[in-house]
């Protein structure tokens, strides 16, 4: 229930006794804001912030991760406090599922299955004509279950994603945001900047949830562990990107919340400026707080909590308790 | 649950200590008032910390507790401060 | 019943407690698959701290395995939030008495429920000793199993910190 804090302005994070303060200068005066340490889930830093070890130690004591982004909203890295709840035996099981090709492929396919399910859900919910995506649904999707390696799987997934992004233009009602092609490094236009920023947030939210469990975030299945440090977070984020991030993008554009004024460009580089970022973050927070009645738990869970449940399902898979089935929004 | 805490504390030293405890859990909104969403366990912990500080003969602290945060409707006259923002 | 190999089977008090609450919880706890502090756990800690302030018992850690509050020459004590898990709490303190007896120390036990203004007094009987020995053997068997025991589908699940884990 604790909250994420996103710091966009420049300033300082300071610990004074057992209080954490964020200080910033507004009109020549220092504004001091106490952040209740028991109400912080994680901190995302986009601004220029000074912080010292005294403050970092305080965050560590309270198991609060700090995620840092550069000026363009690109992820730089995280301060993840030493985990207190590690389970050696679970890590051993996680490794076993990685080195056994069949077991690894089972999980890799499951993540893509969850991703494509939500891709199709988005297309359906946004009134796209069935004929326009039947190649995804009828041709490409069934193929993923026959793949033998993550590379083969990634190739089909790439195909699906290309077709999906082309259909973005039928959902988006503002031609300034039409997608020509998806490019990431760097995003060349506003729509690519939105997708990249959203995916980055998702990655960090998933990482924070993984961090709260005994899962080892560096051991992954779809993505190669060599690719990025916390590749399990990339794996799980696949399922949640189309479920959480893409609908935010459609609604920000189609409801005219976001416009070209919310972006800055550098040569052929587009990124959200501070105003744009804040609009996105607000929509992201609202989305994560949305709730749905869970069918098995028989209680309301937030979208954020669904990510945690996915971590639990993975753990249960590893300890041979229950086979992992990816989350599929059932409503 | 949602809680609004108001306090009357006669001694400055104790007042400071109580405020420091509240700052760990809730948001300072106006003079002698804190508020915020909090779990039952954390609220109990907060109370037990305050328990050790206050003078039961002189001080008083009120906790207005609302089980479902959705039942709180806040109407503001005058300046609305955004002390609970998490996008800074 | 023949003598059990206590040195090999001895364990900590929480595992005895969990054995009577939920064998799945016991297995998960043993594999260090733990959950974040739940509200109930926080409340339990507070109750413990509060009574600690009042009575100032002597806390003793034995064999790095069990930690016991000794209140006076005669009694050891355990503080609990509620009596919902009365059997498990009782067995936990009986286990401590059993453990101490193995070390040649004879004590009696008290379970304190400060929030219920209630106390329970316990003495180790021969029947209890047999029960504890049987339990130690059972715990050993459960923990050796590769897979966790199944979900128990009990009304107590709803208040357990593993609820979301088990039913996700």
Image: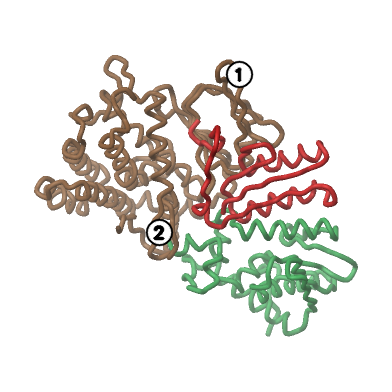
Between A305 and A212, the one nearer to me in the picture: A305
- Specify the chain shown as brown: A
Could you say where residue A196 lies in the image, as x and y percent from the top left? 32, 32
Q: Do labels 1 and 2 share a chain?
A: yes
Q: Name the residue under label 1.
A: A29
Point out the frontmost of discs 1 and 2.
1
Label 1 element class: strand
In the picture, the quarter occupied by the C terminus of chain A is bottom left
Could you say where residue A108 lies in the image, as x and y percent from the top left? 31, 49
- Say above or below: C127 vs C24: below
- Say above or below: C79 vs B86: below
- Say above or below: C81 vs B83: below
N-terminal of the pair, mark 1 or mark 2, is 1
Q: Colour of chain B?
A: red
Can you tell which quarter of the image residue C81 is in?
A: bottom right
Can you tell which quarter of the image residue A261 is in?
A: top left
Q: Residue at x 56, y 41 (%)?
A: A40
Q: Residue at x 57, y 20 (%)?
A: A25
Residue A122: numbered disc: none
User: Which chain is home to disc 1?
Assistant: A
Q: Name the residue under label 2.
A: A317
């Amino acid at each position: 229930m604790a909250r994420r804090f996103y710091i966009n302005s420049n300033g300082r994070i300071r610990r004074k006794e057992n209080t954490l303060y964020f200080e910033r200068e507004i009109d020549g005066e220092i504004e001091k804001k106490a952040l209740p340490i028991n109400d912080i889930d994680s901190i995302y830093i986009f601004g220029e912030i000074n912080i010292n070890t005294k403050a970092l130690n305080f965050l560590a004591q309270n198991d609060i991760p700090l995620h840092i982004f550069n000026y363009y909203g690109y992820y730089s890295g995280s301060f993840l406090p030493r985990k207190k709840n590690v389970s050696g035996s679970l890590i051993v099981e996680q490794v076993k599922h990685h080195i056994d090709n069949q077991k690894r492929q089972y999980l890799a396919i499951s993540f893509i299955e969850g991703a494509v399910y939500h891709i199709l859900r988005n297309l359906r919910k946004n009134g796209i004509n069935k004929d326009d995506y039947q190649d995804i649904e009828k041709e490409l999707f069934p193929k993923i279950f026959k793949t033998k390696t993550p590379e083969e799987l990634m190739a089909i997934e790439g195909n699906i994603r290309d077709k999906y992004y082309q259909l973005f233009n039928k959902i988006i009602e503002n031609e300034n945001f039409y997608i020509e092609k998806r490019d990431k490094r760097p995003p060349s236009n506003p729509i690519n900047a939105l997708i990249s920023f959203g995916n980055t947030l998702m990655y960090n939210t998933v990482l924070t949830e993984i961090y709260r469990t005994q899962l080892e975030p560096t051991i992954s299945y779809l993505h190669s562990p060599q690719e990025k440090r916390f590749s399990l977070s990339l794996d799980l984020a696949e399922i949640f990107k189309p479920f959480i991030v893409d609908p935010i993008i459609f609604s920000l554009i189609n409801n005219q919340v976001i416009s070209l004024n919310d972006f800055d460009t550098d040569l052929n580089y587009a990124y959200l400026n501070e105003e744009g970022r804040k609009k996105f973050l607000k929509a992201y927070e609202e989305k994560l707080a949305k709730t749905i009645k869970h069918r098995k738990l028989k209680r309301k869970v937030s979208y954020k909590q669904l990510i945690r449940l996915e971590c639990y399902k993975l753990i249960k898979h590893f300890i041979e308790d229950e086979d992992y089935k990816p989350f599929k929004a059932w409503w | 649950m949602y809680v609004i805490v108001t306090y009357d504390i006669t001694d400055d030293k104790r007042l400071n200590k109580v405020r420091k405890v509240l700052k760990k859990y809730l948001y300072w909104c106006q003079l002698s008032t804190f508020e915020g969403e909090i779990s039952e366990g954390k609220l109990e912990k907060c109370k037990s910390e305050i328990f050790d500080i206050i003078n039961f003969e002189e001080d008083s602290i009120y906790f207005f507790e609302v089980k479902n945060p959705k039942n709180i409707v806040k109407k503001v006259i005058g300046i609305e401060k955004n002390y609970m923002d998490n996008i800074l | 019943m023949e003598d059990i190999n206590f040195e090999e089977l001895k364990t900590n008090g929480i595992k005895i407690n969990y054995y009577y609450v939920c064998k799945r919880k016991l297995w998960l706890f043993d594999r260090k698959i733990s959950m974040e502090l739940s509200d109930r756990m926080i409340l339990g800690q507070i109750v413990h701290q509060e009574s600690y302030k009042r009575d100032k018992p002597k806390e003793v850690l034995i064999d790095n395995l069990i930690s016991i509050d000794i209140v006076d020459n005669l009694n050891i004590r355990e503080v609990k939030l509620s009596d919902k898990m009365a059997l498990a709490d009782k067995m936990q303190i009986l286990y401590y008495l059993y453990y101490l007896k193995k070390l040649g120390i004879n004590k009696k036990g008290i379970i304190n429920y400060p929030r219920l203004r209630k106390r329970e007094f316990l003495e180790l009987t021969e029947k209890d000793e047999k029960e504890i020995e049987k339990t130690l053997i059972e715990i050993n068997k459960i923990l050796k199993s590769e897979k966790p025991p199944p979900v128990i589908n009990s009304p107590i699940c709803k208040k357990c910190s593993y609820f979301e884990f088990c039913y996700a």
